[in-house]
């Protein structure tokens, strides 16, 4: 297929996507499944709308409520297309698992069996997870997440995400959705993939309300965000890395881990994607945890040097230099710069720790934040969809890091 044909195909895909989005008042094409008269029915369209006659029907089996198959769009990446290296990018964002077992696990968290599930909808996806909204009898809804292949280091990424969410909710008292169940292991897992099942965050997207909010309402919202930041700053750790539940490592051959002042949690290797993306994950490098900011930045430099020595190329940093007649960096040139960086690294860090931020990156994007009516009227804290990303590499005292 030529480039012109591919562009036309993608444009047609976008036209169809927008048509469905307008019909369902959504920005992204979604795929739903309903349990109707003993059958799972799935296909494009809002679950609130009766399935069209063209939708594929999945019949419930007599054994355990398993369905014979689900629509392929539940497992594939359906948000967009690529002009370059599409097959690999799509493969990185696809995942194989047993959808029926995932629904069964979600229902079990609410004390139900799979027959209580009346609706399953694949929500508009991001880059790293498949997310499903599962509706049970009575209208109760839960969220189920399955990480894509590109989400990060297997086991560690899911384990740290759950620990970070639970820490934010239970210790820092942030309005983070409650985690009902999770499994970071694949062997012996009926779903066949790592997963997290959590409550659905209350509220609506901030972007849908911001234009109509009054000045005092916006001020109250900003005050709430400051309160969230303060609650994060109230907690500190002695090492830089990612946080984990100790219980997730029972019987697991683990790396270096350090205890924290908080019972049941410890700090271990980072799950930051900068240590795994663009082939870095295949190179054996120091992933922490580290005892100081200097250790962290030197480990980052040594990571890049080792990747360069092994011949890896990084498309993102090199993309702006590869045009005709442009500067093309060499491996030796990069290594020389990193050597120089390591010589001056100690001088880049402030001596007075009080002038340094200790956390950064709390989720404030309008696509990731939701507001309840109480947030606007009563100045209560806003709800967050997903987890807060709490990380800062330049503090000797505290970094809580999760992908």
Image (cartoon, rainbow, N blue to C red):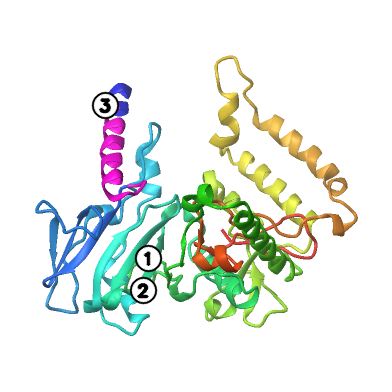
Q: Which residue is mark 3?
A: 1
Disc 1 and disc 2 in contact, CB within 8 angstroms: yes
Residue 118: x and y in percent read 23, 71
- Residue 299 versus residue 198: which sits nearer the camera? 198
Q: Residues within 10 Å of mark 3 (few under 14, many from 20)?
A: few
Q: Is residue 243 above or below residue 9?
A: below
Residue 166: x and y in percent read 56, 74
Q: Residue at x 54, y 47 (%)?
A: 277
The magenta-colored residue range is: 8-28
Q: Quadrant of the C terminus?
A: bottom right
Asked if one can make out residue 362 in the rendered structure from this viewpoint, the answer is: no
Q: Residue at x 33, y 23 (%)?
A: 3
SS label for mark 3: loop
Hey, which residue is sitting farthest left in the picture? 53
- Give the image quarter of residue 320: top right
Sequence order check: which comes first, mark 3 or mark 1? 3
């Amino acid at each position: 297929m030529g480039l012109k044909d591919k562009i036309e195909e993608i444009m047609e895909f976008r036209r169809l996507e927008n048509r469905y989005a307008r019909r369902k008042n959504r920005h992204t094409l979604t795929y739903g499944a309903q349990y109707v008269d003993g059958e799972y029915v799935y296909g494009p369209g809002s679950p609130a709308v009766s399935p069209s006659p063209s939708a594929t029907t999945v019949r419930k089996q007599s054994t355990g409520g398993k369905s014979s198959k689900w629509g392929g769009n539940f497992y594939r990446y359906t948000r967009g297309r690529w002009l370059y290296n599409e097959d690999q990018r799509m493969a990185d964002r696809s995942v194989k698992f047993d959808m029926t077992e995932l629904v069964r696990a979600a229902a079990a968290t609410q004390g139900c069996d799979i027959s209580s599930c009346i609706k399953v909808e694949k929500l508009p996806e991001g880059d790293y997870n498949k997310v499903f909204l599962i509706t049970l009898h009575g209208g109760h809804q839960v969220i189920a997440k399955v990480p894509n292949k590109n989400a990060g280091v297997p086991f560690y990424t899911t384990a740290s995400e759950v620990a970070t969410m639970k820490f934010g909710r239970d210790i820092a008292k942030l309005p983070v959705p409650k985690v009902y169940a999770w499994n970071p292991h694949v062997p012996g897992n009926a779903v066949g993939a790592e997963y997290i099942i959590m409550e659905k965050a209350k509220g609506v997207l901030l972007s849908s309300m911001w234009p109509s909010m009054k000045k005092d309402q916006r001020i109250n919202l900003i005050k709430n965000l400051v309160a969230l930041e303060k609650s994060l700053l109230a907690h500190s750790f002695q090492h830089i890395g990612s946080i984990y539940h100790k219980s997730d490592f029972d019987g697991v051959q683990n790396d270096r881990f350090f205890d924290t002042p908080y019972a049941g949690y410890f700090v271990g290797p980072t799950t930051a994607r900068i240590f795994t993306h663009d082939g870095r994950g295949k190179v054996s490098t120091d992933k922490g945890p580290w005892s100081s900011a200097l250790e962290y930045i030197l480990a980052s430099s040594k990571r890049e040097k080792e990747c360069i020595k092994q011949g890896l190329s990084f498309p993102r940093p090199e993309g702006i230099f590869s045009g005709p007649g442009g500067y093309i960096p060499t491996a030796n040139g990069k290594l020389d710069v990193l050597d120089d960086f390591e010589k001056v690294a100690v001088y880049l860090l402030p001596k007075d720790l009080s002038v340094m931020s200790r956390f950064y990156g709390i989720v404030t994007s309008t696509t990731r934040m939701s507001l309840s009516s109480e947030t606007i009227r009563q100045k209560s804290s806003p709800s967050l969809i997903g987890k807060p990303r709490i990380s800062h590499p330049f503090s000797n005292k505290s970094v809580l890091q999760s992908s």
